[in-house]
Amino acid sequence: MGEIRGRLLIGGMVLRNLEASLDHGAHDSESGWTGSLLIDPPQQESLQVGRPYRLELDDERAGQIEVTQIECIPGQRQLRAHIRGCSPLKWSPYAHEHHHDSVISLTPAAILGDA
């Protein structure tokens, strides 16, 4: 399994800086790959199991994916979203374009005490 960073396009929104693990030898996907994404709990609200999304990786590959399951990771705050490829990952000249419209970057908020 290879690990890489990327982003997920959800309609007009973007989940950025996601850590992805990909398995290119998967037999349960027509495209030949499955994997997982690490997401923060607030990002789960933007994802639906069974819905297609566009995954754009930092190495300039991109493809359609489907979220198949979202689960808790014991001992961690992040969740794991299991994905399967709906299309082959191909080089995309648009994978590094900046999407300025309706961009959402969800990062954990710091909890500050009273000063």
Image (spheres, rainbow, N blue to C red):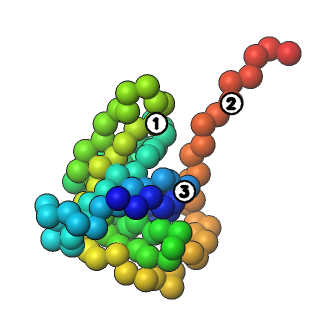
Q: Which mark is residue 66?
A: none
Is the C-beta separation of discs 2 and 1 under 8 Å? no
Residue annotated with mark 1: 78
Q: Hey, what amino acid is under mark 1?
A: Gln
Q: Is residue 48 above or below residue 103?
A: above
Left or right of residue 15: residue 11:
left
Residue 90 placement (x, y as % from top left): 37, 81
Measure the C-alpha gap from mark 3 to mark 1: 14 Å
Which quarter of the figure has residue 75? top left
Q: Hey, what amino acid is under mark 3?
A: Arg
Residue 63 placement (x, y as % from top left): 35, 73
Residue annotated with mark 3: 16
Compare residues 93 and 58 and report the one nearer the observer: 58
Of the residues tagged 3 and 1, which is closer to the observer? 1
Compare residues 96 and 23 and report the one nearer the observer: 23
Circle 3 SS class: strand
Residue at the image point whose x is 46% and y is 30% from the top: 76
Residue at the image point whose x is 30% and y is 61% from the top: 23
**Farthest residue, direction right:** 115
Residue annotated with mark 2: 110
Q: Hey, what amino acid is under mark 2?
A: Ala
Is the C-beta separation of discs 3 and 1 under 8 Å? no
Residue at the image point whose x is 45% and y is 69% from the top: 56
Residue 59 placement (x, y as % from top left): 51, 73
Q: Is residue 39 visible?
A: yes
Q: Earlier in the sequence, mark 2 or mark 1?
A: 1
Which quarter of the figure has residue 20? bottom left
Q: Is residue 12 visible?
A: no
Circle 1 SS class: loop
